[in-house]
Image (cartoon, rainbow, N blue to C red):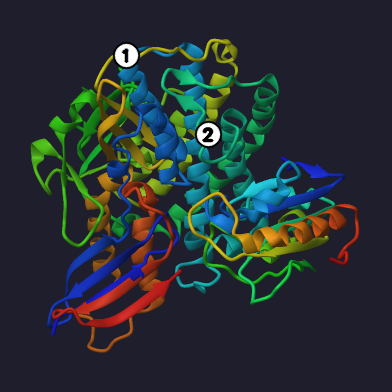
Amino acid sequence: MTRTVIIDPVTRIEGHAKITLHLDEAGHLTDTRFHVVEYRGFEKFCEGRPFTEMAGITARICGICPVSHLLAAAKTGDKLLALAIPPAADKLRRLLNLAQLTQSHALSFFHLSSPDFLLGWESDPAKRNVFGLMAADPDLARAGIRLRQFGQQILELLGGRKIHSTWAVPGGVRTPLSQEAKDWILDRLPEARATVTLALELYKKLLDGPLQKEQRVFGDFPSLFMGLVTPKGLWEHIDGGIRFRDANGAIVADQLSEDDYAAFLGEAVEPWSYLKFPYYKPLGYPDGIYRVGPLARLNVCDSIGTPWADRELAELRQRSGQTATSSFAYHHARLVEIVACLEAIEILVNDPDLMHGRIRLRASLNRNEAVGVSEAPRGTLFHHYKVDDDGLLTSVNLIIATGQNNLAMNRTVHQIAQAYIPDPVPAGAEIPEAMLNRVEAGIRCFDPCLSCSTHAAGQMPLRLQLLAADGTVLAERLRG
Amino acid sequence: MSGPGVEGALLIGIGNPLRGDDGVGWHLVEGLGLQRHQLTPELAETVAAADRLLIVDAWLAPPRSRCLLRPLLASDGWERDTHRVAPARLLALAEQLFERCVPAHELLVPAFDFSWGDHFSPQLRRQLPQARRLLRGWLQGAAAPRA
């Protein structure tokens, strides 16, 4: 009788999912699946709404990455109006996205992932979370909380609130940055720098010590990587062209336009998950597996373009390869990206253009179809709208970062299960919690946002099940 | 980062203003304090900076309950969900991370209808005068005024 282990729901992620581990009759692992089991259908119910509302509506998809949808929707709106926004608006949007990347990466590292590294994979699961971290290392926890707060506060200073702001609009932004807000950001930057320095030092020590095996078996496989780069090939998060690089470092495609995404991205579906499986079309499904997000952005760019971040990028490449292929390197990449964000924020805040009063242009509808793109914390985000002559949406397609990592997340889970689950699993054997936690942690490398990727309401639980060949649940762990 | 307060008093209304009675916390602290869908660890510093704290929330109460204003004590119980923190845990975090033990109360308003919408049920509306009296009393410094 074959068996299956099911992890349901998956914890410390944004959304609701389960993992199933399928065993054959001899107890050998035959398949693993990361199932996303929530569905809400934003793309459908947006039809009929004015495109100008999309920034406000799609920001509601998620409480974690509303800024990403806000910016993608505003950029798509810019293209429907066929206008180029004022420089101050462009830079203010950039500042917003940098703050979003900072706060989201801080959440992922300090709140969601570091408890595994710092408290141990075998530690009490009830305490293996940010609250346990607070008890074990209050200084680090406080610093992490304040780093996230730094990013969130910039979001509030710009958009008037931390989440679900409707500040970015087609044509620009609603309000400028105040002098008081600028001063606050400059005042808090040194502390933010100190915190990420602390986190990098700590994390590198862990990489040299107890996390060596995790680097090898947490989703280390060849794939393509996709992200935005500037025309000169530098790290980019809101404009530029799309680049694909392979695991050997070769540039497979460069400066692709988001307008042509349907030519190079396909979306497959599987009957066991609501999350689509995007792939690089020229290689077909599933060979066209690619990864997006912080690691992909660092892999596709030639350099970041600021001194501290480039030093950190060089060290990441020294440790993990010129093109890092281990999904575990996403954690390191997040910290490097926080460095990049802090440097970019300082440059932007001191840019005189930022304080210019012209921040919004107005125009009538000039196009009936547009695609907008931006880099969300978890990867490249596409919004594709078609509208009628009154500006009412007739079609909406959202391609979300977490979906684009779906194939990679499934492969990562399989690799971890192979490394940590006994082979064969003895009949009736209980699988230790620490092993299942590592399987979950493979998903957390990607910091997936399932609320966004299925455009669904989010809960954070995890369910893991061990299933027999006939579908019988042999073992089950439930968290959340 | 400090929230709007009244002479060192910090009020936090919790709930979803688009889920009927769940929005009563937001409604009562309008203009007086912070409005949040849920409490998060980041609020610990704001709490630690306050002289006293009142959390206002909807309450799935037993039948015939009335508004309840009660002291809130810090608790360091463990939570799995890192996205939201119970009020008692938030107080403990403020103490643990920022070394401030803040006197706190919670005002619980019996709630009856959590369906979609930005309006309150008739039963909850009948509770509002008492809730406002309790809130005013707390603001004026009485720990637990009579309803």
The residue labelled by disc 2 is A99
* Spatial separation of the CA atoms under disc 1 and disc 2: 27 Å
**Which callout, 1 or 2, points at the residue further toward the start of the chain?**
1
Dot 1 amino acid type? Ala
Q: Position of residue A135 (x, y in %)?
A: 65, 64
Of B117 and A252, which appears nearest the observer? B117
Q: Position of residue A187 (x, y in %)?
A: 69, 29
How many residues crowd around disc 1 within 10 Å: few (fewer than 14), some, or many (20 or more)?
A: some
Quadrant of the drawing holding the N terminus of chain A = bottom left
For the image, the number of numbered tags is: 2
Asked if A293 appears above or below A387 in the picture, the reply is below
Q: Residue at x 49, y 72 (%)?
A: A125
Dot 2 amino acid type? Ala
Element at badge 1? loop
Q: Residue at x 88, y 64 (%)?
A: B145
Q: Position of residue A292 (x, y in %)?
A: 30, 40
Q: Position of residue A276 (x, y in %)?
A: 22, 49
Q: Chain of mark 2?
A: A
- The answer to the question of whether label 1 and label 2 lie on touching residues, with beta carbons closer than 8 A, is no
- On the picture, is B54 further left or further right than A395? right
- On the picture, is A459 further left or further right than B128? left
Q: Chain of mark 1?
A: A
How many residues crowd around disc 2 within 10 Å: few (fewer than 14), some, or many (20 or more)?
A: many
- On the picture, is A266 further left or further right than B38? left
Q: Residue at x 36, y 72 (%)?
A: A435
Of A298 and A315, which appears nearest the observer? A298
The residue labelled by disc 1 is A82
Asked if A263 appears above or below A231 in the picture, the reply is below
Asked if A397 appears above or below A208 in the picture, the reply is above
| Residue A353 in which image quadrant | top right
Asked if one can make out residue A336 in the rendered structure from this viewpoint, the answer is no
